[in-house]
Amino acid sequence: MKYFSLQDKSHSVSFEEAVVNGIAPNRGLYFPEQIKPLPLAFINSLHEKDNTEIALKAISQFIGDEIPVDILRTIVSETIDFDFPVEQISDDVAVLELFHGPTMAFKDVGARFMARCLGYFNREKKDQKVIVLVATSGDTGGAVAHGFLGVKGVEVVILYPSGKVSDIQEKQLTTLGQNITALEVDGTFDDCQDMVKNAFLDTDLKTLTLTSANSINVARWLPQMFYYFFAVKQIYHAGLPLVVSVPSGNFGNICAGIMAQKLGLPIAHFVASTNVNDSVPAFLNSGIFEPKPSVSTISNAMDVGNPSNFVRVQQLFDQNLEALKCQFSAYSFDDAQTREAMKKLYESYKYLADPHGAVGYLGLKKFLNVHPKYHGLFLETAHPVKFLEEVEKTLNLQIPIPPQIASVMDKPKTSIRISSYEELKGVLLGR
C-alpha cells in the first residue's frame, strides 16, 4: 500500500515511511492511494467471527506485505486484548464503550497498534532512536505514554496544555518516567499541535528521526476502524439503519469510522458531536472552513479549534460538500447542555457518562429527533473517572477509582514547563 500527501498527490510513500515520518515534508497528512471494499460475505458474517480476525481483515490492505501476516496478527491481537461492549440505553439508543483498555480511553487502541508497528520497523536499527512527538488535549498523552513505555529504540515527548487537562489525565502522562518525557505548555492544545507540526519541518532537527503519535499518523488513525466493526458485530440484528454519533475533537476517530463505512460496513450516517469548538458544524452551515482559537470546556479532549483530520474526512468524500452532508452531520453543544445530558443519562437510564460521551449522546438525540427511523449508537470514549471532579459535582455522587487509575494517583508528577517552540527545539536537541 502506498500513501500520498493530501498537500501533494505526487508525493508517495510506503506504510513504513508514513508511520516513521508521521507527516509529509510539505505538512500534508498521508492518505491511502486505494480503498478496496471488503467482501460482502465477510461483512455479513461479522457476528460469527472473533475480534482479532475482524481487525486483521480490516487493516491488512493498508499495510500490504510490509509486516508479515503472523506478526501483524500478533500486533492486532495484543492491541485489542480487552472488551468493547455495546450497552443498550433505550429502544433506539445504544452506547459503545471504548474505555476498557489500560488507560481507560479509546486512544489505547491506536497507541498500542502504532507502538507495536514502530517497534517492528525499528527492530534492527540498533543505533538509531526514533523520537515520538505528540500533542495531547487529554487522553492521547496517557495512551501514548502507556503504549510506548519501554519500547526499545523509541523516546516519547508529549506536549500538553498546562491546566487544561484533568488531574488524572495529567498523572497518566507525567508519572511513568523511563522513555517518556512530558512537556507542560503555556498555551492551548492548538499551540501544542502547531509546535509538533513545526518540528517536522525544521531543518535544524533533520539529524533526528521524528514521528508523530497523534491521529495524524496513519498507524494511530486507521486502527480506530476496529471499534466500528466490533459495534456492528454486536448490533447485527438491529433491523433499522444505523447512525453513529462520535464525540469529535481532532476528528481522527470519526474519520476512521467513515473509512470503515467505505470498506463496506453498514453505517448509514455519522454525527460529529462537538463542544463549543465548532469549526466543523460551522463549515457545514457556511461551506467555508475557518479554524478558530480553541476554547476550554469540561469535555477538554475535544477542545480543538483546527481539527487536523477533517481534511481526511473531506478526501473520503472527494471534497464534495453535498456528498458529505448526505452521510455526515455535525452539531455543537455547550457545557450547560453537556451537564444536563450527563444528568439525563444517569437519572433516566442509570448510565454514568463522562462529558465527552454526554456530548455524543446529545448529538445522537438531535439527529434522531428529526430522523426517528434509525437505530442510534453513541461512543463513550473515556471512563467517567478520568473527569472525576466534574462528574461527581454534576451528579452529586462518588465514583470508585478503578485499579488502572489508582496505580498512578500517588506517583509524583514530572514535567518540563515550556512556552515557545524554541524551548521545545532545545529539549529535542538536548536529548
Image (cartoon, grey):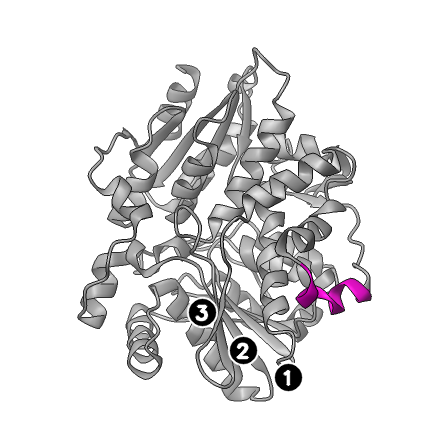
Specify few, some or many for label 3: CA neighbours under 10 Å numbering under 14, 14-19, or 20 or more. Answer: many
Residue at mark 2: 376
Q: Which mark is residue 360?
A: 3
Q: CA distance from mark 2 to mark 1?
A: 9 Å
User: As drawn, is 103 to the left or to the right of 63?
Assistant: left
Q: Which mark is residue 240?
A: 1
Mark 2 or 1, nearer chain start: 1
Query: Is residue 95 in the magenta section?
Result: no
Specify few, some or many for label 1: CA neighbours under 10 Å numbering under 14, 14-19, or 20 or more. Answer: few
User: As drawn, is 368 to the left or to the right of 325?
Assistant: left
Whole-percent x, y for residue 89 in the image: 44, 79
Q: Secondary structure at mark 2?
A: strand
Position of the C terminus, as image quadrant, is top left
Does the CB distance between marks 2 and 3 fall below 8 Å? Answer: no
Mark 2 or 3, nearer chain start: 3
Whole-percent x, y for residue 386 in the image: 31, 54
Q: Which residues are magenta?
A: 40-49
